[in-house]
Amino acid sequence: MKEKYITIAGIDHYYGIKPFLVGKKFKCIKDKNNLWDSEAIKVYSKDIGTVGYIANSHYTVIKGTMSAGRIYEKVKKKFTVKVMFVTKSGVICKIVDGLKDNKLEVNTNEDSI
């Protein structure tokens, strides 16, 4: 399966760049109660709480990464990302755990043939 990368946005509203070290992992949680974005995905640190959101606008998504809207149906309610790059433009993470299984279900019921 091809690796999936995302951009973390909104970090200036929380703790800035400080929590993001290359190799560090964060939990991501679908934020179904978000009033502004129906596909919002919160990025969470067990030590300090919310540290940002997965970018979901062409203004905030770094080229080569996927938006929250593009991954929303491909990930479970909670999943894990790992920081791969920290730049002045933003934080890029790889999804390392929590992708939904994309295999096709095979119907083994002979009566349906």
Image: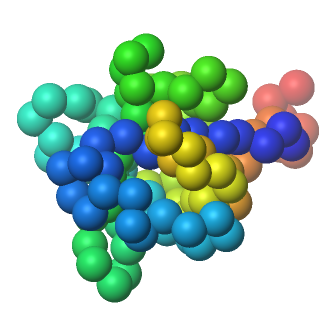
Measured as percent of width and height from the top left, residue 69 is found at 45, 27
Asked if residue 101 is positioned above or below residue 90 in the image, the reply reads below
Question: Is residue 77 rendered to the left or right of residue 70?
Answer: left
Q: Nearer the viewer, residue 80 or 25?
A: 25
Tell me: 6 left or right of 42.
right
Asked whether the viewer can see residue 75, the reply is no
- Looking at the image, is 37 positioned above or below residue 43? above
Give me the residue at 25% from left, 31% from top. 38
Residue positioned 26% across, 73% down in the render? 49
Q: Identify the residue at the far front of this view.
A: 88
Question: How far across and down, in percent of the image, does residue 8 sit?
Answer: 44, 45
Residue 96 lies left or right of residue 44; in this view the side is right
Occupied quadrant, residue 74: top right
Instruction: Let me know if residue 4 appears in the view.
Output: yes
Judge left or right: residue 58 versus residue 96: left
Q: In the image, residue 3 lies at what x, y percent?
A: 79, 43
- How far across and how far down the image is residue 22, in percent? 64, 65
